[in-house]
Image (cartoon, rainbow, N blue to C red):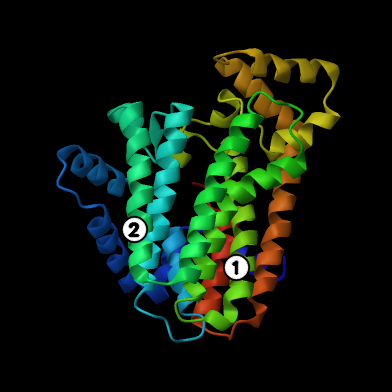
Amino acid sequence: MSGVAARMRTPVTGALRDIQEPVRSRLDDVVAEMQRIVTDNLPIIREVSAHLLQMRGKMFRPTLALLSSAAAGKPEARATALGAVVELMHLATLVHDDSVDHSVLRRGLPTVNSMFSHQVSVIMGDFLYSRALTALVEMGDLEILKIVTDVANELTIGEMRQLAAVDSLSFSEDEYYRLIRAKTASLIAAACESGALCGAAEFRRPLAQFGDRLGMAFQIADDILDYTEDESVTGKPGGLDLREHKVTLPLIAALPSLSAVERERVEALFRAENPSDGLVADTMAIVEKAGGIEYARRQGERFAREAEAALRVLPPGSIRSALTDSIAYVMERRS
């Protein structure tokens, strides 16, 4: 995979820290800005916000926004606020996802809906969205506001597409790509494009394309993890997508080549309200044997190559290297 392949030979442990190195001090400012944005006098909001900030994860999207803002060597201070907005919107989608899916764990911690209630979860997700958009308005940039509000719409559409796909073994590969572009790639692309508008506007289009392709690769890699890693690695039970009757690319790719017996076993899983461990394990094995995981991996690599190609117009240096390394990180990460 050209430059990406070479980077994949480097162990992923610590890779994100290396990618974040050019913007590390600014990431600390992003966290402080997130705390400022969600601060409120209402005790329940303070309690839930504190829990959510513990769940914020690896700050990958703010990292991309900050790196994109520095692509021309003149990053603007407002990229810090943008990074906070992007991460809060991401947190909002996770809160809503967990409530819709009745998930009990996220990154090894209790979800908001399991720790508090589904009502609190829904309202808190709305609160994160509204506070993030308020902070965006305070930036006073209509171009960035349009990019991010368009993404808020895409994220909602993505959720609806996901609901429509439940229990549907006829879900196509093209439909899957539309789903993950709305649900995942749109926010990563927005982080890169709006980040570019904070200091590297001349690279707006290639960075938007890079973010879109990186987001597609990111979600495919994430869907593969559900088949290949267990809870000790990912922080959520293995086979969770299958338990929740979510059809992702490995299964879509495997279905056409299944025998009648294998197809019936998969259909039995989707008929079961609460699939047994045996049904989930059997389906995971069937998908792997049919080549579904390998096919998905190849498609992820295709998007990764396109992401790398989009970066070729950027000037050589630490920022371009960090963005390129982020592709290998996405493809090789284990959680």
User: Where does label 2 land, which residue?
Assistant: 134
Query: Is 229 placed left or right of 79 in the picture?
Result: right
Instruction: Name the amino acid, label 1.
Output: Ala
Quadrant in which the N terminus appears: bottom right
Whether residue 242 is situated above or below residue 260 in the rendered picture? below
The picture quadrant where one finds residue 47 is top left
Q: Earlier in the sequence, mark 1 or mark 2?
A: 2
Whether residue 129 is situated above or below residue 79 in the rendered picture? above
Q: Out of 60 and 50, give the one closest to the viewer.
A: 50
Q: Position of residue 148 (x, y in %)?
A: 49, 60
Residue 152's disc is none
Whether residue 172 is situated above or below residue 195 in the rendered picture? above
Q: Residue at x 70, y 72 (%)?
A: 309
Q: Residue at x 38, y 63 (%)?
A: 136
Q: Out of 273 and 100, give the one closest to the viewer.
A: 100
Q: Position of residue 324 (x, y in %)?
A: 58, 70
Q: Residue at x 62, y 37 (%)?
A: 161
Dot 2 falls on a residue whose secondary structure is helix
Q: Is residue 51 visible?
A: yes
Dot 1 falls on a residue whose secondary structure is helix
User: Which class describes the residues within 10 Å of circle 1: few (<14), some (14-19), or many (20+)?
Assistant: many
User: Where does label 1 land, which residue?
Assistant: 208
Q: Position of residue 312 (x, y in %)?
A: 66, 79
Instruction: Name the amino acid, label 2.
Output: Thr
Q: Residue at x 21, y 52 (%)?
A: 39
Q: Position of residue 93 (x, y in %)?
A: 45, 44
